[in-house]
Amino acid sequence: MQKVAVIGLEKAKSDLIAQLMDLEAVELTDQTDKLSDEVWAENVIQDSDQEQVSYLEAKIGRSAQALDVIDQYGGLKSPLFKTRRIISRQEASAIPGREIETEDLIAELIGLNENLRAKRDEINRIDIDDLMFQPWQAYDVPLDQSSTESMTTVMGVLPQAFTADQVEKAIAAVTDLYVMKQVNEDKAMRYLAILLPRECEEQALNELKDVGFQHLDMSSFHGTVCENIARNNQRKEQLQSEIDSILSQIVKLAERKNDIEDYQDLLTIELDKQRTKTKLLKTDKAFFMEGWVPEKCVPKVRELLDANGCYYEFRDPLEGEDVPVALQNKGFFKPIEAITEMYSLPSYGTFDPTTIYSLWYICFFGMMFSDACYGLIMIAVCGLLLKKFNLEGTTYKMVKGFFYCGISTFFWGVMFGGWFGNLIEVVSETFFGKTISIEPILFDPLDDPLKLLIISLGLGVAHIFLALGIKAYILLKDGKVVDFLCDVVLWYTTIIGLIMWLGGGAVSESLVTPGKWIAIVSIAGLALTGGRDRKGAGKLVGGFSNVYSITSYLSDILSYARILALGLATGAIAQVVNTMGSLAGGGVQGAIIFILVFLFGHLLNFAINALGAFIHSARLQYVEFFGKFYEDGGEPFDPLRKRTKYIKIENN
């Protein structure tokens, strides 16, 4: 990375920012801290236009609201992957000319949605009224004529826990002049209409509360209950017709969804330009900005700054500066960056191991999943997605990475003889009475798990040795020869010596004794050099700690046994599924049952073990491999660019 400082004329600022967005090579840094310096504060101010930012945010919010309406009611199918449409610069330049038309479209969609919501709210209110009316259909007195100057009708519900006698006693305590009628009854309530003197209404209601009576005031409704229900049904039919009309209008307007998406992305670009200005300082006629530029992009940035009449200066990062990180992997290795990014980017100036561990990750994944048919499925699905969709960013990296893992899975499936487990053998025996099988090229892990365990641990040792080799490279590059000898060479000899001592006898007894002495001398070296940077008792403690780390290395090596475990799990579960499917025997019925069990069982096995292979392959990189040398904590390089959601504007 190079740090660039730029001074330019205010009148060239907007064009320069737009061109930097197209170039995607400069990450601007915030200059607010400079305003705490008196000299800077006296001569410059922070550049911003909050009023314009708020204006653009409001427009983007309205366009997003209109797109939500289309997504909800427009009847358009959502693609499996949402990818950006590629448009030319000429097409992009035509978008502002449709601004008024697009704003009218947005306003129309928002208005239709508000109208739709209002009509549905009215239907909900009518439904609530209908629920209230249903038990009262036998009450044929007009609701707005249920009272006179001297008498009134009180309507309400009484829980079944209370009796009508209790209600009559409560009323009788107020007046003897009353008539009570039970209109309806269900499991929970009694529905009562009580005619009594108007002057006794308030006192009677107070007495009725004590016996659980709940008053219902329906005096605002006109006509009988049945007439109200009929009117409600008629109104709902009318409202539903109007709703259908609104929905058809939205479906028609949804055909112009691309116009709104284009417009929103254009607004987003303009909003980013305005927000970018807050990272700049300015005077009346000039502006100042700083940012980071990848070294390979410096010539293009120079050319752009010269074209805009700017004064600028490039320099190397200073010690202690927070420098962003941009990984530089290409071709085959680029997709595996997604695995590195999931962990953490390497700190600036340190080692990026992506190109080195990529093949290991893909190999481990294939050995853990290890079924040729599962691999073919991954290859087909990922290949189709890559061909059909214009995938970008992390999604592209992950799909392309899984494509590679599918190839590895197919390869190891062929090596280990896994074709949907032992599907061919089970089908041939169950339905054709013959035994047909595909023999593994290497061996079947289920028949010889010890061999796979030895291979797994051997790969683990090689993987860890490679990590130590990277550490050696870093130390020698920094001129730390002593650290190289003590922290790398001694660990090489210790591990090799222990392997020869403890396991060499399986190959040749002549390896045991040399291995023992190599291990003893190496461990002594670890003890003597472990605390070399400490003083006094710290040297002893450091040496002991260094020797104790042998257990950590042994644990790391044993961790690679998970390759065996997951490989066996994939094959064993696949065989169990096949066996379960064959239990119904041959014939049409057996075939149907077998297919159903096959589809469900292998789908479940695929999902579980693909996830396991993905996670555990990554773990072997993150813990056992990265743990030997990796310095994380890098912040991703985030250049000024057009952060569009729906369109991708070609720069050509």
Image (cartoon, grey):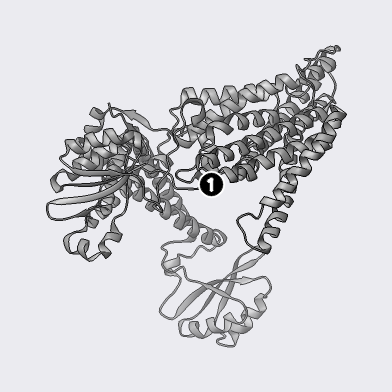
Q: Which residue is mark 1?
A: 631
| Relative horizontal placement of residue 643, taking residue 328 as reference (left or right) | left
Place residue 91 in its image quadrant: top left
Residue at screen point 49% across, 74% down: 153
| Relative horizontal placement of residue 547, taking residue 72 as reference (left or right) | right
The quarter in which the N terminus is drawn is: top left
Q: 429 above or below 128?
A: above
Image position, residue 560 (x, y; %): 72, 37
Place residue 259 in its image quadrant: top left
Camera-side residue of 422 and 543: 543
Residue at screen point 58% across, 33% down: 357
Image position, residue 121 (x, y; %): 42, 54
Q: Residues within 10 Å of mark 1 (few under 14, many from 20)?
A: some
Camera-side residue of 231 and 553: 553
User: For the image shown, how many numbered marks are present on the structure?
Assistant: 1
Residue that sits furthest to the bottom in the current view: 173
Image position, residue 85 (x, y; %): 36, 30
Place residue 367 in its image quadrant: top right
Q: For the residue marked with disc 1, what is the amino acid?
A: Glu
Image position, residue 33 (x, y; %): 30, 60
Q: Secondary structure at mark 1?
A: loop
Camera-side residue of 578 and 568: 568
Res. 651 in view: yes
The quarter in which the C terminus is drawn is: top left
Q: 93 above or below 190?
A: above
Res. 418 in view: no
| Relative horizontal placement of residue 557, taking residue 271 as reference (left or right) | right
| Relative horizontal placement of residue 273, taking residue 334 as reference (left or right) | left
